[in-house]
Structures are given as structure tokens and as C-alpha cells.
Image (cartoon, rainbow, N blue to C red):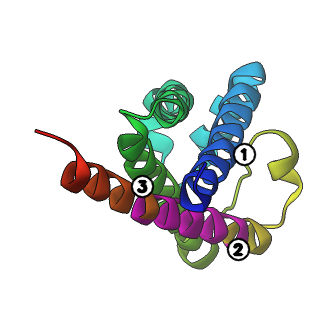
Amino acid sequence: MKKSNLIIEIISALLIFLFVYTATAKLADYSTFRFQLGKSPFIQPIAGLVSWGLPMLELLVSGLLIFRKTKIWGFYGSIFLMSSFTIYIYMMLNYAYYVPCSCGGVLSDLSWEDHLIFNISFLLLALFGTLLESNQNAKSIVFSKP
């Protein structure tokens, strides 16, 4: 296995683990997750939709990251999710009058500032994985036989 393929697989595995873990934690304690979202000043009007849609989207993106043919879409989904989470945390830290914790599992033990750093780190991983995967796809198109 080429080094870039190994890196892509490691990044994919990290993102899959993160999204499956957080989706499972949210669904396992759904009532608390839904309650906390309902207290969020930015999500309150759509908390019901987000409380089911977000874990399902996390699981969908994880599924896309598993397969070679859909991996690039999984990376795009990862960028979308991690960008959204990062922007949400930034807005909560800087503009919210109340900052509820709606994260699942051990991530709920992080401070909001630590969580922001964590999310930025995974966003950078997703961006790097997308770049590597895009380069792999471009090379396979150039070197494939007609």
C-alpha cells in the first residue's frame, strides 16, 4: 500500500470512529440530546429535526468513507459536518447568552474552547484527506486504460 493510501485510510478511520461514536452517543441518550438542543438559542426552532437528522447524517458520512467509490463524498461530508460544528461552537462561545452541551460521550467532558480546537483539528484532517483522495482520483483517471 502506498503511503498516501495508508494516510487516507487512517484519516477515514479516524473520521468514521468520531462520527459513529458521536452519533451512537446522541442516539443512546436521545432525550438528553434533544433537550439540550432545545435549549440552544441557534437551534431551538429546528431542534426536533436536528436531533434525528444529525446522527443520521453522521452515520451516512461514515458509510460513505468506508468505500473507495464514495470516499471522496465522505470527505466532503466530513468537511461539511466539521465546518458546521466548528462554526456552531464559535457562535455559541461568542454570541450565545446560554451555552448548553449537546455533545455525546467523552466529548461532553471537553470545555467549549477545547472542543473548538478538537473540531478544527478534525476539520483540517478532513481537508487533508480530501486533498489526498482527490489527488489519488486524478491519478487513477490519468493512468487508467481507455
The region drawn magenta spans 117-131
Answer with mark 2 or mark 3, whichever residue precedes in sequence.
Answer: 2
Task: Identify the amino acid type marked 2.
Answer: Ile
Which numbered disc, 2 or 1, marks the residue that appears first in the sequence? 1
Query: Which badge, 3 or 1, comes first in the chain's sequence?
Result: 1
Which residue is painted at 59% across and 46% down in the image? 12
Q: Is residue 71 visible?
A: yes
The residue tagged 1 is: 103
Res 42 seen here:
no
Q: Name which residue type carries label 1.
A: Cys
Of residues 90 and 8, the one nearer the viewer is: 8
Residue drawn at x 24%, y 52% as measured from the top left: 143
Residue at image coords 47%, 29%: 67
For residue 121: magenta?
yes
Q: Which mark is residue 133?
A: 3
Please identify the residue farthest to the front as the structure is shown.
Answer: 145
Q: Please tell me whether residue 123 is drawn above or below residue 17 in the rendered image.
A: below
Query: Could you tell me residue 95's position as x and y percent?
Result: 54, 75
Q: Which of the two residues, 38 or 68, is positioned nearer the viewer here?
A: 68
Q: Does residue 16 belong to the magenta stretch?
A: no
Density class for disc 2 (Cα within 10 Å; few <14, some 14-19, many ≥20) is: few
- Res 34 quadrant in image: top right
Q: Is residue 102 left or right of residue 144?
A: right
Q: CA distance from mark 3 to mark 1?
A: 29 Å
Of tags 3 and 1, which is closer to the observer? 3
